[in-house]
Structure formats: C-alpha cells, structure tokens
Amino acid sequence: MDFQDKVVLITGAAGGIGLAAARKFAAQGAKLALVDLNQETLAQAAASLDGALLLAANVAKEDDVKYYVAKTVAAFGRIDVFVNNAGINGDFKNIEDQTIENYRKVLDINVIGVAMGLKYVVAQMKAQGGGAIVNTASNGGLLGAPGMSAYVASKHAVIGINKSVALEVAANGIRVNAVCPSGVDTQMMRSIETNAMAGHEEEARKRFEAAVPLGRYAEADEIAELMLFLASEKASFITGAYYRIDGGGGAVSV
Ligand SMILES: NC(=O)c1ccc[n+]([C@@H]2O[C@H](COP(=O)([O-])OP(=O)(O)OC[C@H]3O[C@@H](n4cnc5c(N)ncnc54)[C@H](O)[C@@H]3O)[C@@H](O)[C@H]2O)c1
C-alpha cells in the first residue's frame, strides 16, 4: 500500500492502536499529523517518527478539533486520510451504579469527539475533492457487555455515525469506514482488566483471552493493518462499512 506523501491525521496517536497505525503509515511514506491529549506524552510516543506534526488537543472540545484540523492543513495543505481513533473505556459498573458523569465523559470523547472530528475533516476533504476516513469503533459497537453500557452505547453510536456520514459524503469522493476490534493488547485492556478484577489483572486477562476463539488479544499492529487497507486505494469500493477484527468472537456471539 502506497501512502507516499499522503497526509494522514490520527487522533489518540500516543496510544497503542493510534501509534501502531502512525508507524505503518510512516513506513509507507505518509506525512503524519498526530493528535493526543498531552504534548509530552505524544512527543515521547512519536520520538521515532521524524517530521510528524504533534498536536495536543482534546477531541471532545470543538475548538481543539478546529485547531488540530487547521494546523494540519496549514502544515501540509490537505488531509488525505483521517484515523478518528481517540477513545476511553470509562468506569465499568452495572446500570444502577452508573453515574451521569461517567456516561457524559464516555459519550463526550467517544461520540462527540468522533462527530466533531468528522465535521471539520469532511469540510476539508470536500474542499480538496476527496479522502478516506477510518473510525475506530469496537466489537462493543456490535455486542452487549455487562458493566460496559456507557462504552457499548458510545461504540454503537460510532457505527451509526459512520454509516450516516458515509452516505452524506459518498458523492464527494470521501470513503468512511469503521473497525470493530475485540480486546487489543494496549493500555486500554490494562484499564479494562483492572475495571473487571482489580488486584487480579492476570486472571482477568486469561479469562478475556480464553473467550476469544483465536485464544488471545489482538496486537495493535493487526488493527493498524486493517486501518491501512481501508484507507488505501485497495478499498476503493468500500464505504459505510464496519469490520469485525475479533479473533472469531463475533462468529460465536452474533
Ligand atoms: N484496546 C482495545 O481492546 C480496544 C478494542 C476495541 C476498540 N478500541 C478502541 O481503539 C481506540 C484506541 O484505543 P487503544 O487501545 O489504542 O487505547 P489507548 O488507551 O492505548 O489509546 C487511546 C489514546 O486516546 C487518547 N485520548 C483519550 N481521550 C482523548 C481525548 N479526549 N482527546 C485526545 N486524545 C484522547 C489517550 O490519551 C490515548 O493515547 C479507542 O477508540 C478504543 O475505544 C480499543
């Protein structure tokens, strides 16, 4: 896949999946604009990615979204690929113990953050005549999970936004697709293991992995490969789609 001199904007780029994608796009010649909450953390994560534009921004704040899009366009002139990936898992509790604060925080970042990213990137892609977008949903966008209703709601919403926006922009040469991973071996799974069984994280990991037909978490690189495919010309007839990448889990449960 050739991304030579393509401008690739990635949110959540200091995290496991975002950084894996950044490395793979860079290896194919892309120019990177990387967004995450904290400039220092981002700089550490992206230390090996020469020439990447590093942008500290909170995807849930509209002004921050305007800022990261404007800075990317000012630096590189366009946005060819947008990996709309930043997200959090929030607190896991059954519904009667959920708080309005947790629900609002998860929905703010995972839904409003994704929608605002699309709003401003789509405007730029329309003006330049096309582009490709990959939204990071989750198998939680397709399935239920006890204790995870806020996260699951947010990822179902991402799939709904993905489908709707894909239809809005299909005539503009913009493709919009989503990936739906099950557990990926990143910081987010560490947080989920603690949420599930605080003090017994290794046991939680074993149980989660045992539930996957392939018997393990995904590597972030495996998710990044699907993102690159969907962003590439090889996926030229794919839009409004969402792809399970779950070691077979969806085949059992759906
Ligand atoms: N790890 C998994 O098991 C898994 C499974 C399915 C889907 N996902 C999704 O993949 C995406 C990436 O997750 P990951 O596994 O790389 O986790 P991660 O925690 O390693 O990375 C997430 C990154 O997003 C950043 N971020 C969080 N809130 C932000 C905000 N408001 N503004 C800007 N950046 C913010 C974090 O700082 C972090 O660097 C998320 O949307 C997550 O929901 C992860």
Image (tube, rainbow, N blue to C red):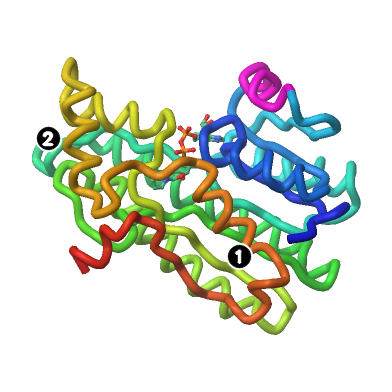
Please tell me whether mark 2 or mark 1 is closer to you in this view.
1
Q: CA distance from mark 2 to mark 1?
A: 38 Å
Range drawn in magenta? 39-47
Q: Classify mark 1: helix, strand or loop.
A: helix
Q: Residue at point 66% right, 18% down?
A: 44
Asked whether residue 165 is drawn in magenta, I would say no
Disc 2 under 8 Å from ligand 1? The reply is no
Q: Is residue 118 above or below residue 194?
A: below
Q: Residue at point 79% right, 56% down?
A: 3
Disc 1 under 8 Å from ligand 1? The reply is no
Considering the image in quadrants, where does the C terminus appear?
Answer: bottom left
* Residue with the most extreme left position: 96
Q: Mark 1: few, some, or many residues within 10 Å (few <14, many ≥20)?
A: many
In terms of image quadrants, where is residue 91?
top left
Q: Is residue 37 above or below residue 116?
A: above
Q: What main secondary structure does the magenta stretch of the protein show?
A: helix
- State the residue in front, 193 or 89: 193
